[in-house]
Amino acid sequence: MESWITVVIICGIYLAITLAMGIIPGLKVSDSVTGFVAGDRSMNLLILYFVMGASIFSSFAFLGGPGWAYSRGTAALYIIAYGTTGMIPIYFFGPKVRRLGEKYGFVTQAEILQDRFNSTSLSALLAILSIIVFIPYLTLQMKGAGYVLTTISNGVIPQWLGAGIAYLVVLLYVYFSGVMGVGWTNTFQGIFMMVIAWFLGLYLPYKLFGGVGEMFTQIAQSDMSVMLQAPGLNAAGEPWSWWGYSSAVVVSAVGFSVWPHLFMRAFAADSDRTMKLTAVLYPTFQLFLIPILIIGFTAILAYPGVTPADTILPHVLTQLDLPVIIIGLVCAGTLAASMSSGDAILHSAASIGVRDGLDHILPDRWKTDQKERYLIRLLVIVISLVAYYFAVISDIPIVNLLLGSYGGVAQIFPLVFCMFYWKRANGYGAVSGLLGGVAATIFFLLYPELRPFPLHEGIYGLIINISLLTGVSLLTEPEAQERIERYTNA
C-alpha cells in the first residue's frame, strides 16, 4: 500500500473521532436557541480557553503562518504581536457582556449593541458585516484543509474534494450540536495541535540544520539574510515599511477583540471569573505559534521556490523521510487547525444571520425557539456552500484573506467601546460611524495607491468611523438615561 494512502486513512480516523466528539455533547444541552448558540451559558474555563484559543490555530496559523515566514520572513511576527494584545479589551468588557447576556437573554454581539444604541438598523448592518467578513475567514479554513489533503495524496485527492470532505464533518457536528459541539471538538483539537506544533518546530530544524540556532545562523550568513531583518517583506517581496507593519498589528489587535465568534463566547461563559481567567491565559497560546513560524523559516534554505507559499508545511512533510504514521498525525493536526476555527465561524455566522438579520423581517410565528433553531441550521448549510464555492475558485493567499477581513471587523470596536464607556454615544452616531468606517476600509482596499500613507486600510476606516460616531452623536439627541446606565453600571 502506498504511503499516502496510509496518511489519508489516519486523517480519516481523526475526522471520524472529531465527528463523534462534536455530536455527542450536543445531546446534553437544551433544545433551544440559547442551548444551540450559547450552550445554556455553561462553558467552564477549560472549554472556553480552547474554544477561544483554537481560533488562533486555524489554517491561518498552520499554513498561512509558515507560508509568511517562508516567503516574507520576520513579517510573520506580526501574528504574535497582535495575538498577545488582542484579548486585553475582552478582560474589561467580557464580564460585562456575560452579565448583561444572562440578565436580558442576549446571545449575539449585534443583539447587545442593538439594545444599547436602540437601533434595529444597527443590528441588521452588523449581521450583514459579520457574514461578509466571515465568508473569507471560513473560505480560508476550507482552502487550508484542501491544501493538506491534496499535497499529502500527491494530487490524487483534488483540493475541492479535500475541502469538501473535511468540512462535511464540520457541517454535521455544527448542525446537530451547535456551540457545545464546537467547544468539545476545539478542546480535543487544541491539545492535539499543541503537541504537533512543538514536535515539528523542534524536529525539522534539528533534522535539516542540527538545531534552531544553527538554522538561523545559516540564514543570516546566506543571501537570504533579508528574511531576518525587521519588519520583513511585503507581498511584492520588497522590504515592508514600518507604517504597513505597525498598522497591520494595530488593526488586527483591535479587530481581534470584537470578532463576533470570539465576542459571543462571553455569553457562553459560566461566570465572570471564567471570562477573566480566559482573557488572562489566552496569550499563552502565542507560545505555540513560535514553533509554527520556525517551520517556515526552516524551509527558506532547505526548500526554495515552493509555490504557493501556504503549502510549504505539507510540502516539507512529503520531502522528508519521516515515518508514515508521523506524517499522518501531522496532517491530521493541520486539519484540526482548519476545522477548529471553521466550526466556530460557521456556527457564529449562522446564529448572527438569523438572530440579527432574519428575525427583523420574519413574521412573529417564526420567532419561536424551535423555528429559529431550524433556520440557524439551514443557514449553516447555506453559508458552508457559499464559502466552499469561494474556496474552490479563489487563489488569494491565506493570510491575505484574513488580513483583509480584519479591516472590516475592526470597525465594530468603537461601538463596543462606546457601549460601556461613553454615555453620549447614540444609535445615529453608531450607524453613521459603522457605515463610514466600512466604506472607507473598502475604498482604500480597492484603491491602495490613493492612501496618503502606506497604512492598513482599516486604519483609515477607524479614523472615519470614530469621527462620524463622535460628531453625529454630539449633534443628535442622546439615548434614554435608563438605557445608558444599564451598560455604564454593568
Image (cartoon, helix red, strand yellow):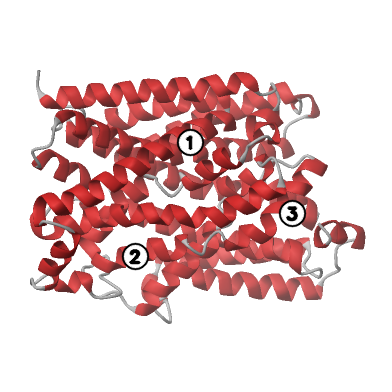
Which residue lies under the disc numbered 3? 96
Q: Which mark is residue 77?
A: 2
Q: Is residue 269 left or right of residue 290?
A: right
Residue drawn at the location 69% of the way across and 36% of the way down: 41
Q: Which mark is residue 187?
A: 1
Relative to 175, say whether 256 is above or below. Answer: below
Q: Position of residue 342 (x, y in %)?
A: 44, 38
| Mark 2 residue type | Leu
First reached walking from the N terminus: tag 2 or tag 3: 2
Residue drawn at the location 66% of the way across and 39% of the way down: 268
Nearest the viewer among 71 and 395 is 71
First reached walking from the N terminus: tag 3 or tag 1: 3
Tell me the SS state at disc 2.
Answer: helix
Residue drawn at the location 71% of the way across and 49% of the way down: 272
| Mark 3 residue type | Lys
Give residue 393's quadrant in the image: top left
Asked if disc 3 and disc 1 are in contact, CB closer than 8 Å, the reply is no
Q: Position of residue 310 (x, y in %)?
A: 25, 50
Relative to 115, say whether 19 is above or below. Answer: above
